[in-house]
Image: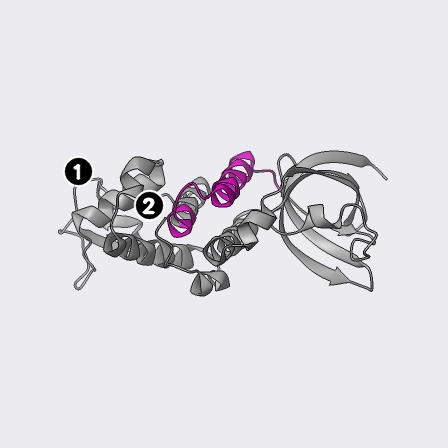
């Protein structure tokens, strides 16, 4: 069987038999991979802890008929322990890996891989509020997938903004001339925060007050749920109280 090596972030795991585990990973070069890690649930396993969700590892695999087989795993980014000790970070990371799972398939997506690893690293290091980090990740991941929202110019006509009417189904803010009756309106602070999260302007994002963050999170959640098939179950459990 062909042998290959890649860097991967663990999205989720499932028990298999008495000692094995199926590991779903987003890899740097091979896209999303499902592989069997044999014996990792035994206490003597040398690499079981390196194949837990949110961990980044250098893995060696054999190609199998239905599932590949992991033969080696070396830690590259041990983010799991730091993330799981904080509930806000844990719930945010859970939503991130679920989104990555839905947004990626077998074909490689280096941008999605690098974005996810960077977001998990940021969570582990507590660089920004967990909720802000999640919202930024979701906006960027959706943009890479082809669903970039507009927070300034009209997403329908291209008319220069600013515009306040936001319509998820139309891709962002829209001009009054094409806004459906009763379309929700966003204030300038919320639109500024959303734009900052999309572009990575963390100085502006970190300065946003709690009300503005809450409004922006609602917009991001609605936009994400609309574009992802059956939405994200993890979003309802995300702790939005984090204000770091």
Classify residue 109 as left or right of residue 192. right
65 part of magenta stretch: no
Label 2, secondary structure: give it.
Answer: loop
Instruction: Read off the residue under disc 2.
Output: 149
**Foreground residue among 140 and 197:** 197
Q: Earlier in the sequence, mark 2 or mark 1?
A: 2
The answer to whether residue 194 is visible is yes
Badge 2, how many Cα within 10 Å: few under 14, some, many 20+?
Answer: many
Badge 1, how many Cα within 10 Å: few under 14, some, many 20+?
Answer: few
Classify residue 59 as left or right of residue 226. right
Classify residue 99 as left or right of residue 58. left
The colouring scheme, among rainbow, by chain, secondary structure or one colour, is: one colour
Residue 194 image point, x, y percent: 29, 46
State the predominant SS element of the stretch in magenta: helix
Residue 129 image point, x, y percent: 39, 48
Q: Residue at x 21, y 60 (%)?
A: 184
Instruction: Read off the residue under disc 1.
Output: 160
Image position of 61 with respect to 80: above or below: above
In the rendered image, the residue lying farthest to the right is 1
Residue 64 image point, x, y percent: 81, 47
Figure quadrant of residue 203:
top left
Magenta range: 107-134
Figure quadrant of residue 225:
bottom left
Q: Residue at x 86, y 40 (%)?
A: 1
Q: Residue at x 43, y 46 (%)?
A: 142
**Foreground residue among 169 and 133:** 133
């Amino acid at each position: 069987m062909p042998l290959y090596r890649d860097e991967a972030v663990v999205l989720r795991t499932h028990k298999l038999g008495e000692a094995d585990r199926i590991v779903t990973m987003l890899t740097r070069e091979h896209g999303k991979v499902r592989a069997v890690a044999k014996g990792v649930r035994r206490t003597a396993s040398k690499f079981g802890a390196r194949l837990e969700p949110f961990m980044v590892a250098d893995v060696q695999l054999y190609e199998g008929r239905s599932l590949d087989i992991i033969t080696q795993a070396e830690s590259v980014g041990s983010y799991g322990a730091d993330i799981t000790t904080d509930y806000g970070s844990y719930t945010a990371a859970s939503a991130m890996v679920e989104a990555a799972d839905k947004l990626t398939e077998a074909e490689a997506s280096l941008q999605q891989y690098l974005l996810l690893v960077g977001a998990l690293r940021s969570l582990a290091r507590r660089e920004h509020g967990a909720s802000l980090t999640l919202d930024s990740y979701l906006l960027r991941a959706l943009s890479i997938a082809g669903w970039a929202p507009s927070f300034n110019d009209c997403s329908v006509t291209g008319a220069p903004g600013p515009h306040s009417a936001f319509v998820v189904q139309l891709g962002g803010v829209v001009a009054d001339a094409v806004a459906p009756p009763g379309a929700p309106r966003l204030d300038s602070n919320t639109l500024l925060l959303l734009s900052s999260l999309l572009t990575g302007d963390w100085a502006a994002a970190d300065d946003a007050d709690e009300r503005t963050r809450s409004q922006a999170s609602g917009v991001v959640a609605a936009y994400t749920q609309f574009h992802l098939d059956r939405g994200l179950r993890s979003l309802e459990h995300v702790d939005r109280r984090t204000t770091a």
